Structures are given as C-alpha cells and as structure tokens.
C-alpha cells in the first residue's frame, strides 16, 4: 500500500464520522492507524508570513482607531508594524506582558505625532491604551501562529489524538472479555451442576440396587418362605415395590437439589449485578470463579444430607425387617412350645388311661 501524504491522511480523518464513540471497531482501528501514520509523515513547509504581517497591520490600525488613536498616528505604522510584530510572534519566546510592553514602545518610537508635547498620544493613558492593543494582538494571533508559518520537516506528536481512541477500544475489548466470561458462566455452570446431580442420582441408584438385592431381597424371600409363599408372585412384587420406594426417594432428593440450583441464579440476580460491575470496568472473572466454587460446595453439602436421608430409610427398613424376623422366630418358638405342651398332655392322658384299665382288671381277678 502506497504511503499517503499528510494532506491525504488529514482528508481521511476529516471525512470520517466525527462522532467517535459511534464508530465501529474497524473504523476506530482505521482512525488510530491514520493518526499513527500521520505521526511519521514530516510536515510540509508553510510560509504565509506576508499574509500575517498584513493582517497584523490591519488589526492594529483597526484597534487604534476604535480607541481614538487613528489618523496620522495609525497610518504611520502601516508597512513596518506588521513585520516587526509578526517576527516577534513567530521567532521569539516573548510572553504576553513583554509583547504588549514592546508594542507600546514601538508605537511611541515610530508613530508620527507621538513626540509632540501637546498631543493626546503623549500621556500615560496613551501608553496604557497601546499596551491593551498589544495584548489584544497577542491573544488573537499567537495561538494560531502555525497557520502562517511552518518550516516543514517536523514530526507531529499524535499521541494525544490516539489516546482517547485506544481508551474506547480498550473499554470495548474489556467489555467483550467480561461478557464472554459471564456467558460461559451461564452456559457451563448449569451444565456442571446438572452433571453432578446426575452423578449423585446414579450413585444412589447403584447403592439402592446393592441394598435391595444384597439385603432386602434375601430377607423378603426368607419372610415369605416362612409363610409358604416363596414360589408365589409376591416375592417379585415385594422386591420391585421396595426398589420403587427407594427410587422415588432418590428422585425426590435430586428434584429438590435441582430446584435449589435454579433458585441460586434467581436469588443472586447475576445478570444485573455483573453487568453493572462490567460497566464500572471491574474484572468479574475472579468473582465468577468464587460463585461457582461456592455453589459446588453447597451442592456437595446438600448431596451429603440427601444421602444421609436415604441411608436413614435403608437402616429403618433393615430395623423393621429385623423386628419382623424376630417376631416370626418368637411365633415359631411359641407355636413349638404349644405343640410340645399339647403332645405332653396327650401322652399323659394316654398313660393315665392305660393305668386305669390295668387297675380295673386286677380288681375283677381278685373278686
């Protein structure tokens, strides 16, 4: 790409939308690049000194006439006041006070009629008036002196022009980074929490299966078998019903955890809170990490409580089964004792009957 002249660069900057905050990122980048390029292109030679001298002459004469110092006095300055004053403005470091003193002295020495003792211009008021005129000329021309003369070959410092543009770009980039972090938080956090809930559910289902098949089923079969129902369909129904009860408990715990996770986002009002922090140019990434870690810790605490509740129901089932088993054993013992007592009673009666019959026979024989 061919290098642009200063004029071409300046024309590009002048044509571009002056409402800088409304520029697109690409337009901002182009504007920054233009100012950087401008800062490496030497200035052109500019010489409008004669125009400067002429304008100073006209302005000085106009001010003098407005303040009542016209006529011969002002006319006598035309032709050499402009060049003298212009050179002072262009090539000296003279400040305002020094310049106005020099102007009043210049007028005193070079104006026709200033030396007449009876002239109005000779008094102190006249000198003060010339100083005011000098001050006016200095303030009018000094700030724009480069519009009349520039030796060229100079490098323009454009850093002041680039700084606000870079600040806008930095703010936009910062906002994009923070918004991306917030979007990731909203996308990834629910997914991570859901994955943990699924792992919790799967772990509890595995434990429930081990419990039902390893503990509950053998006891259920034993209990039903004691009643002669081991080959009936009640065995499968009893085991299936128990697994369903435990599964319902697990699903209830998972649903409660899901509701808690959803409430977490609602209560914290993340969007408005973090959008405000981004607008204040606050890096929210550390806070988002903290919120995620805190939520995971709370979730694990809830999982532990849920698992304890499930264990409590496991243990309660086992306790009930032990009670039922003990009751069955007791019933068996009572039944066995009753049967034993009955058998003994019957045996005693038989023995008594035999003995009685023998006695009757003996009496008959003796008789």
Image: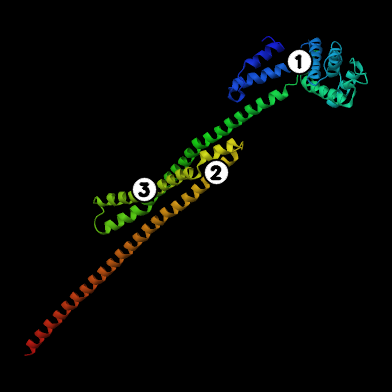
- Element class at badge 1: helix
Of 91 and 339, the residue lying toward us = 91
**Numbered disc total:** 3
Closer mark to the observer between disc 3 and disc 1: 1
Label annotation for residue 247: 3
Location of residue 158 with respect to 298 vertically, above or below = above
Q: Earlier in the sequence, mark 3 or mark 2?
A: 3
Question: Would residue 153 be seen by someone viewing this image from the given angle?
Answer: no
Pointer 1: what residue? 147
Residue at the outermost front position: 118
Location of residue 58 with respect to 305 vertically, above or below = above
Seen at 15% across and 82% down, the residue is 355
Pointer 2: what residue? 291
* Percent x, y of residue 77: 86, 14
**Quadrant of residue 121 in the image?**
top right
Closer mark to the observer between disc 2 and disc 1: 1
Location of residue 304 with respect to 114 vertically, above or below = below
Seen at 62% across and 23% down, the residue is 20
Q: Quadrant of the N terminus?
A: top right
Q: Earlier in the sequence, mark 2 or mark 1?
A: 1
* Percent x, y of residue 24: 58, 22
Q: Report whether 47 appears left or right of 224.
A: right
**Labels 3 & 1 near each other (Cβ < 8 A):** no
Q: Report whether 104 appears left or right of 51.
A: right
Seen at 27% across and 70% down, the residue is 334
- Element class at badge 2: helix
- Element class at badge 3: helix
């Amino acid at each position: 790409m061919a290098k642009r002249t200063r004029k071409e660069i300046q024309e590009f900057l002048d044509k571009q939308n002056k409402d800088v905050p409304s520029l697109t990122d690409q337009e901002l980048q182009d504007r920054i690049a233009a100012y950087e390029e401008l800062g490496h292109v030497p200035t052109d030679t500019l010489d409008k000194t004669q125009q400067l001298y002429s304008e100073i002459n006209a302005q000085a004469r106009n001010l003098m006439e407005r303040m009542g110092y016209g006529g011969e006095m002002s006319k006598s300055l035309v032709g050499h006041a402009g060049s003298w004053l212009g050179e002072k403005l262009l090539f000296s470091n003279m400040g305002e006070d020094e310049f106005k003193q020099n102007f009043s002295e210049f007028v005193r020495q070079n104006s026709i009629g200033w030396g007449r003792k009876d002239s109005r211009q000779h008094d102190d008021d006249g000198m003060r008036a010339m100083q005011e005129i000098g001050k006016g000329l200095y303030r009018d021309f000094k700030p724009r002196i480069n519009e009349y003369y520039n030796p060229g070959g100079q490098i323009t410092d454009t850093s002041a022009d680039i700084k606000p543009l870079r600040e806008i770009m930095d703010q936009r980039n910062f906002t994009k980074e923070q918004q991306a972090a917030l979007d990731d938080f909203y996308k990834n956090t629910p997914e991570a929490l859901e994955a943990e809930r699924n792992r919790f559910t799967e772990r509890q289902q595995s434990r429930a299966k081990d419990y039902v098949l390893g503990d509950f089923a053998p006891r259920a079969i034993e209990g039903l078998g004691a009643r002669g129902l081991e080959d009936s369909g009640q065995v499968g129904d009893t085991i299936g019903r128990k697994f369903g009860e435990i599964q319902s408990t697990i699903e209830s715990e998972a649903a409660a955890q899901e509701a808690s996770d959803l409430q977490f986002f609602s209560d914290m009002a993340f969007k408005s809170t973090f959008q405000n922090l981004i607008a204040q140019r606050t890096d929210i990434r550390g806070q988002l990490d903290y919120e995620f870690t805190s939520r995971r810790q709370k979730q694990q605490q809830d999982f532990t409580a849920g698992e304890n509740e499930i264990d409590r129901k496991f243990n309660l089932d086992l306790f009930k089964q032990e009670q039922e088993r003990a009751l069955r054993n007791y019933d068996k013992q009572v039944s066995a004792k009753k049967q034993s007592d009955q058998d003994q009673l019957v045996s005693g009666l038989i023995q008594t009957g035999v003995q009685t019959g023998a006695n009757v026979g003996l009496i008959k024989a003796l008789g």
